[in-house]
Amino acid sequence: MIADLATVAGAGVSWKVKHYDDRSDILESAGDKGWQKRFTIWSHVGSPAKPFADFFMTMLNAAGQDDLLDETRLLLETILENDGLDFSTEQAAEHLVTRLATDRPAQSCSR
């Protein structure tokens, strides 16, 4: 069952996410071929896929900002290695959210 559908146009590429009960699929526009699934983010106990997929869509939209992408990648790796947030990663996440809100390019998103 599709719970939500969002489309983002960024860097000349259109992306959309389809949320299901057990996963979220990230699809890329393939022109005449329609939409092709590029990534699947699976839900786990206590960790639904939807927030990660929505975050990933935001990062796709920030394409071209390599330092922002690197900071995000490092933060996600640390969170996964630590099995969640600790004080340090929570502060880093707050900093990243602030950057996303102020540094990212204008986006086009429809739900």
Image: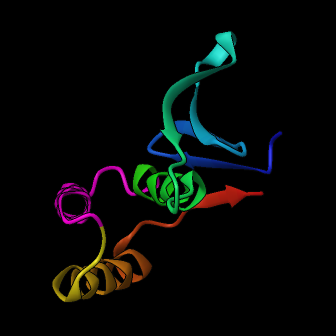
Tell me the residue at 30%/79% (across/down): 93
Tell me the residue at 34%/76% (across/down): 103
Number of numbered tags placed on the structure image: 0
Quick check: 31 left or right of 3? left
Question: In the current view of this chain or complex, which residue is farthest to the front?
Answer: 45
Quick check: 19 left or right of 86? right
Q: Position of residue 40 (x, y in %)?
A: 51, 33
Image quarter (top left, top right, bottom left or bottom right) of the N terminus: top right
Start-end of magenta stretch:
61-83
Q: Position of residue 62 (x, y in %)?
A: 39, 57
Q: Position of residue 84 (x, y in %)?
A: 30, 70
Q: Position of residue 60 (x, y in %)?
A: 43, 49
Quarter occupied by residue 48:
bottom right
- The prevailing secondary structure element of the residues shown in magenta is helix
Decide whether residue 73 is among the magenta residues. Answer: yes
Q: Give whichever of 4, 22 is nearer the camera.
A: 22
Quick check: 31 left or right of 60? right
Question: In the current view of this chain or complex, which residue is farthest to the top?
Answer: 33
Image quarter (top left, top right, bottom left or bottom right) of the C terminus: bottom right
Quarter occupied by residue 88:
bottom left
Tell me the residue at 19%/66% (across/down): 82
Q: Give whichever of 13, 6 is nearer the camera.
A: 6
